[in-house]
Image (cartoon, grey):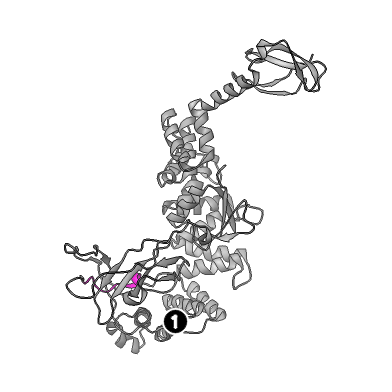
């Protein structure tokens, strides 16, 4: 039997899933390296990143640019997509840990010559390409994105989509005059070295000035500074203070984070109602993780913390944004009429959305819809198609359903029974547990299918379960003497 894995997200134990399904979740980013996983044979739950081969060290795509000084390379985390701008001469061939998801990133050795003839300038990356903290730091002022020209023949660089550069000079005057948005953007420039030397201390200082004026994004940025100890000493109390202010001022990332802290009891005392309150606020702003946390949150007994109608609402909203597990769960809510009137057509539609993303349990459920004609025309061939796709990923329930749909299950029962009864018609008396046994005839009381049977005179086996009829499924019993 394949490994049966379980994993934990937002205090919810999810599973079982197979090796292939766990790998798929990791590849899609729905399973994070820091999530806890467990299977039979493991003494304790472990971080997913410790499972060998689950998060392989990525073949990191390289970008390069000419600057005044060393060669700068841009690497992407293969697990979460976070980007880093690094000194190519210093980091080439080395490893470091992603500050967002803790994935170990291997930086390939580069053989790109540091001269104009070998390099094509691609422009300075913007906010997506250099932040060192969890979350996205967006600029208040931006212009349309652009795509660099294609590399010349023989150049190892590939076309790279870039975002406009932020330059400290455009914000310094306004920031000095007290403009909060400019102060926040200037903090980003110092954080990432855009137009000024990289300086975490100055970054935190400008974030602080903007945060004191009530700038929600600066408050979120300052929270991350205190949380990670970047430019300031790490301080959980100050981190909580600025996180709370950012959440109260409407920053969706902060609202989700604060809700998660209340849910898990991290930094603050565990408080389910507070967690749900902040998740709801973030969810109303379209925050996908908050919507899924509301949809999937369960108590210690495994029951949803929301009424069925609200659970359906958040599942539907997360599914609308493409969350594969939400799409799968939405299918079951429609199919079972949980929190919404039963609707097989909508169930099949939701299962299809998740199935087309490659989620094996959804492929199995869609196969069942076709096999039973639930929400789609009854179609044996389509059922087999989806079962086979799920089986290819190790979905055991799909294998059983495929066997039923193709008649293999019936054949297996027939062969099993035939093997058990083989030779009985050729002998009249046999030894069973040392007692005389008689070969006789019996038939199914429902469909009257005949069977050979062997039963012991005065045996305790008489009257016990002898299996199911291969014709109609009725339970058969050994006859009494």
Majority secondary structure of the magenta segment? loop
Q: Position of residue 299 (x, y in %)?
A: 63, 56
Q: Nearer the viewer, residue 39 or 377?
A: 39
Q: Name the foreground residue: 420 vs 5.
A: 420
Residue 163 spot, x, y in % from top left: 28, 69
Q: Secondary structure at mark 1?
A: helix
Pointer 1: residues within 10 angstroms few (<14), some, or many (20+)? many
| Residue 459 higher or lower than 96, as above or below | above
Residue 144 in the image: above or below residue 401: below
Q: Quadrant of the C terminus?
A: top right
To which residue does mark 1 refer? 211
Which residue appears farthest toward the bottom when viewing the image? 176
Is residue 122 in the magenta section? yes
Q: Is residue 6 above or below residue 105?
A: above
Q: Is residue 163 visible?
A: no
Q: Is residue 159 visible?
A: yes
Q: Residue at x 54, y 38 (%)?
A: 397
Q: Nearer the viewer, residue 424 or 316?
A: 424
For this orientation, the residue located farthest to the right is 458
Q: Nearer the viewer, residue 105 or 196?
A: 105
The magenta segment: 121-129
**Could you say where residue 214 lies in the image, as x and y percent from the top left?**
44, 80
Could you say where residue 72 lies in the image, as x and y percent from the top left? 30, 75
What count of labels does the image hold? 1
Quadrant where the N terminus lies?
Answer: top right
Side (left or right) of 93 relative to 366:
left
Residue 353 in magenta stretch: no
Q: Quadrant of residue 146?
A: bottom left
What is the quadrant of residue 98 in the picture?
bottom left
């Amino acid at each position: 039997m394949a490994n049966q894995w379980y994993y934990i997200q937002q205090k919810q134990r999810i599973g079982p899933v197979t090796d292939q399904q766990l790998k798929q979740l990791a590849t899609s980013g729905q399973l994070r390296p820091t999530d806890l996983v467990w299977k039979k044979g493991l003494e304790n739950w472990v971080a997913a990143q410790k499972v060998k081969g689950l998060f392989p060290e990525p073949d990191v795509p390289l970008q390069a640019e000419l600057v005044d000084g060393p060669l700068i390379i841009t690497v992407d985390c293969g697990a979460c997509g976070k980007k880093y701008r690094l000194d190519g001469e210093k980091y080439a061939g080395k490893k470091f840990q992603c500050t967002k998801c803790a994935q170990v990133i291997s930086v390939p050795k580069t053989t790109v010559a540091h001269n104009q003839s070998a390099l094509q300038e691609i422009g300075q990356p913007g906010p997506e390409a250099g932040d060192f903290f969890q979350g996205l730091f967006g600029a208040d002022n931006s212009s349309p994105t652009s795509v660099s020209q294609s590399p010349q023949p023989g150049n190892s660089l590939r076309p790279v989509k870039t975002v406009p550069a932020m330059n400290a000079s455009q914000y310094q005057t306004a920031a000095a005059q007290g403009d909060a948005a400019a102060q926040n953007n200037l903090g980003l420039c110092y954080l990432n070295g855009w137009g000024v030397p990289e300086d975490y201390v100055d970054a935190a200082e400008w974030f602080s000035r903007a945060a004191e004026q009530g700038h929600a994004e600066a408050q979120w940025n300052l929270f991350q500074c205190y949380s990670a100890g970047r430019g300031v000493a790490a301080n959980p109390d100050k981190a909580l203070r600025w996180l709370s202010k950012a959440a109260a001022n409407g920053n969706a990332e902060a609202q989700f984070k604060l809700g998660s802290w209340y849910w898990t009891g991290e930094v603050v005392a565990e408080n389910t109602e507070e967690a749900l309150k902040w998740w709801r606020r973030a969810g109303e702003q379209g925050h996908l993780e908050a919507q899924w946390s509301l949809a999937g949150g369960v108590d210690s007994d495994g029951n949803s913390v929301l009424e069925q109608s609200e659970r359906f609402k958040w599942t539907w909203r997360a599914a609308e944004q493409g969350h594969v597990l939400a799409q799968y769960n939405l299918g079951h809510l429609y199919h079972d009429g949980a929190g919404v009137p039963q609707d097989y057509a909508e169930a099949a539609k939701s299962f299809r959305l998740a199935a087309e993303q490659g989620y094996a349990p959804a492929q199995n459920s869609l196969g069942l819809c076709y096999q039973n004609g639930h929400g789609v025309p009854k179609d044996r061939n389509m059922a087999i198609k989806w079962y086979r796709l799920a089986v290819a990923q190790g979905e055991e329930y799909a294998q059983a359903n495929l066997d039923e749909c193709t008649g293999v299950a019936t054949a297996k029962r027939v062969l099993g029974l035939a093997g058990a009864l083989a030779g009985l018609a050729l002998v009249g008396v046999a030894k069973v547990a040392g007692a005389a046994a008689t070969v006789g005839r019996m038939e199914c009381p429902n469909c009257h299918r005949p069977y050979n049977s062997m039963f012991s005179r005065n045996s305790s086996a008489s009257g016990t379960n002898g299996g199911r009829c291969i014709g109609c499924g009725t339970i058969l019993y050994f006859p009494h003497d």
